[in-house]
Amino acid sequence: MELAALEKQLRTLQTESIAKIGAAETSAALDELGSSLLGKRGALTDLLRGIGALSAEDRPKIGAIANEVRAAIDAALSDRRGAAGAAELSALIAAESTDPTAPGPLPQLGSLHPIPETIAAIARIMASFGFTVAEGQEVEDDVTNFQLLNIPEDHPSRDLWDTLYLREPGRLLRTHTSPGQIRTMRAVQPPIRVILPGRCFRYEAVDASHGFEFHQVEGLLVDRGTTLADLKGILDELARGLFGPSTRTRFRPGYYPFTEPSVAVDVSWGGAKDGWMTILGAGMVHPIVLENGGIDPETHQGFAFGLGVERIAMLRHEIPDLRAFLENDLRMLRGLR
Ligand code: DAH
């Protein structure tokens, strides 16, 4: 082997190696190149096997050239390693680091179901007139649900309530919150100002405006000298609080066995859907009912009202079908927020 030929091979190895190193992208690729070029079995060692065929005089020359080639390849490797390492580090930082200034993930916010929300709205308004909240019981007895409210057994007015009776004789699911009037009057002395929200049950065919399970809020005020004007004043305010300040009310004669006189109350609040909607029944507590509650009708009078919560929630939130309240469809609840 001639000196010139070997030198040429070495220089070629140098340029080719530097080109390969320049094209390598990762430190792993550079490590591999390093050992395939400069390692014990690498390309440079391979070439230098030819050195034995040279004259004693040429050998040191080739040795010097080989050292230059090794140094040049080494320098190219470490340059490129530095650049690749920096790029890898910044990619790693970009992939793994968190940005503490970024907005956090939004938690799922809950909201009240329209029924308890409406009950709370009613309770808030009534609280401003001194009414507190109490609760009756869902399983009632016939006596309290009907008889003490001046609805005798076998009286035709019982037909107003399609009742779900329980197996135990005399027990039923309350058809309205009115039995809470009796329980309240028997438990507390007048003056009484209380509202009684709760679930009621009726044997009804279910459709968009009737359910076998629904909610009422009962109101009861008992005091000296209470009149129908007091009832009207408070119900006007309740309607305005629920439906807006320009709401009008209409009191029509009604019939309930436990009030005398009895009224049905309609509201209208103008706008696109003008018209009258009946939202509650009310009246002056019947003297017999006061007596059944342990109150002397000569000294005390009272008014009472009962309103349907579903009806009011439907009007407030423009929900067309009362069955939606029982379906637990989260889309409805989210739409109300
Ligand atoms: N309890 C009646 C019903 O469910 C509603 C009602 C009407 C309640 C008049 C009252 C009232 O307190 O005075 O149909």
Image: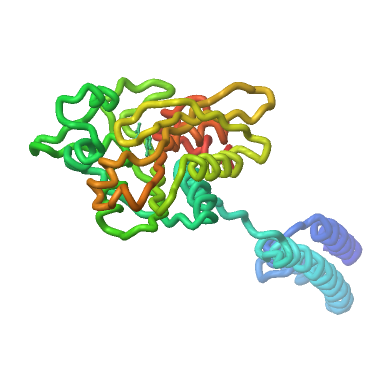
- Quadrant of residue 193 in the image? bottom left
Quadrant of the frame with the C terminus: top right
Position of 184 with respect to 272 (left or right) is left
Q: Which one is nearer the viewer's eye here, 213 or 91?
A: 213
- Report the residue that reaches farthest toward the right: 4
Q: Can you say which quadrant of the picture contains the N terminus?
A: bottom right
Residue that lies at the very extreme toward the front in this rendered image: 298
Residue for point 22% across, 36% down: 146
Residue 300 drawn at (x, y percent): 36, 51
Residue 323 vs residue 159, the one in the foreground: 159
Residue 183 spot, x, y in % from top left: 26, 51
Q: Is residue 185 left or right of residue 106?
A: left
In this orientation, which residue lies closer to the viewer: 255 or 72?
Answer: 255
Left or right of 137, for residue 114: right
Residue 148 picture location, percent across and down: 21, 41
Q: Position of residue 176 (x, y in %)?
A: 31, 37
In the image, residue 79 above or below residue 184: below
User: Can the viewer see residue 187 in this picture?
Assistant: yes
Q: Residue at x 59, y 44 (%)?
A: 241
Residue located at (31% from left, 36% from top) = 258
- In the image, is residue 77 above or below residue 136? below
